[in-house]
Image (cartoon, helix red, strand yellow):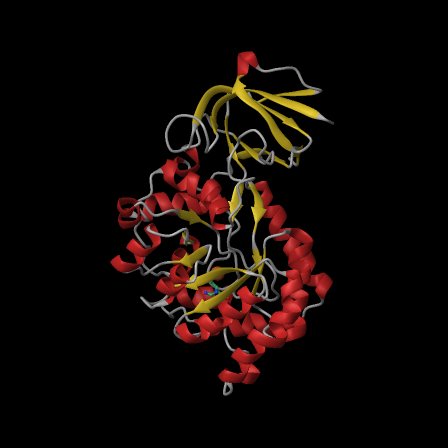
Amino acid sequence: MASEVIVNIGVLATMDDGEGLMGLRRDAAVVVEDGRVAWVGSSPQAPAADASFDAGGAAMIPGFVDSHTHAVFGGDRSAEFDARMSGAPYTAGGIRSTVAATREASTEGLATRTRHLLEEALRQGTTTAEIKSGYGLDVDTERRLLEVASRFTDETTFLGAHVVAPEMRDRRGDYVDLVAGDMLAAAAPLARWIDVFCEEGAFDVEETRRILTAGREAGLGLRLHANQLTMSGAAALGVEMGAASIDHCTFLSDEDVDALAASDTVATFVPGAEFSTRQPYPRIDRLRDAGATWALASDCNPGSSFTTSMPFCIALAVRDMGMTPSEAIRAATHGGARALRRSDVGRIAVGARADLALLDAPDPVHLAYRPGVPLVSHVWRSGVRTR
Ligand code: NIG
Ligand code: FE
């Protein structure tokens, strides 16, 4: 099918030209051609196309851009979650149990699981997902994880510096050398980005700087797990090094917020992690006042945030972080694209990829207003309707 016109869209959130933060257009139509958006305008004026779809007055948004997932892993940590809900604290240590299960899993077994998670995400409107390695922590397993990730996305991230590998616990200097050396060399051909978990119990600021510098020299873009569990120097380092995004940002100082606002670095919030670790939610007010850019992502992983649902993250961000529904929906689409330095996704405009989510709702605000309800009724990815 070469072209399709989607007519009778009650409210179209373009995240581009239009009213307010979501770039709204009413009674709109979209023409999709060869995987791209070819025309956006008013429904009564829509041109003819090879096929037509009637949206029945429902709301449409761009497909979600989930810029932070750890969607390749083995094992299960529901018992750890259960213990946490009885009062046990979250620490980076749990990562090692997933590492053991992941190393044991076959490559095809891992890929089957990742496919399942991404299909689950797609049903909920996610059309672009970043995927990190980080549960291998040896050269061969990290390479295998990135090979699996690259079957599903171009947004692959090398996270060999997730924690120090268990067998090298007493030789952390050697582990940093390995990550910045042989592991990076094996990962770089399969990765677009490098990420480090810069935190107490993981890697300190100087180790992080060294690993990110090596990643940049290998041609990778920079991202960072920053200020998740403590107020550390990680966020400042990420901004200083020009990272595309610093993620989590549960604890930010006023200086961090000002530095972010003066930079091209996006702050990516992952409220699924606060939900699942019972940490305090970060508030958005200071970032809004300072004019910083932020994104929302799922952080899908078996330890701290086992959700693929961007609508769930939107609802949390609105309820607990002080985002307006428009801010949260923009952060989950356009914001995610910014965090991945992409302009072809996260908005509905001529030339953009035709990634569209139709809602069983008259207004996008329903994504937060009706939490827990599966509102995504139809999804187009690169112009092809997948459901
Ligand atoms: O983003 N912070 C580090 N990594 C993951 C958690 C990993 C785990 O607990 O397995 C995160 O929260
Ligand atoms: Fe993460």
Q: Is residue 83 left or right of residue 113?
A: left
Can residue 161 be seen by looking at this rendering?
Answer: no
Tally of numbered discs: 0
Residue 349 visible here:
yes
Question: Quick check: 24 above or below 69?
Answer: above
Q: Position of residue 23 (x, y in %)?
A: 43, 29
Q: Residue at x 53, y 56 (%)?
A: 69
Quarter of the view holding residue 190: bottom right
Q: Quadrant of the C terminus?
A: top right
Question: Measured from the top left, where is residue 163 in percent x and y?
Answer: 50, 74
In which quadrant of the rendered image does the N terminus lie?
Answer: top right
- 140 or 102, which lies in front? 140
Identified at 60% across, 33% down, the residue is: 354
Provide residue 245's location: percent of width, then percent of height.
45, 55
The residue drawn where x is 58% and y is 69% is 135
Residue farthest toward the top in the current orientation of the protein = 44
Quarter-wise, where is residue 131 in the image?
Answer: bottom right
| Residue furthest out toward the front | 217
Q: Is residue 57 left or right of residue 254?
A: right
Q: Position of residue 361 (x, y in %)?
A: 47, 28
Could you say which is closer to the camera, residue 340 or residue 50? 340
Q: Nearer the viewer, residue 348 or 126?
A: 348
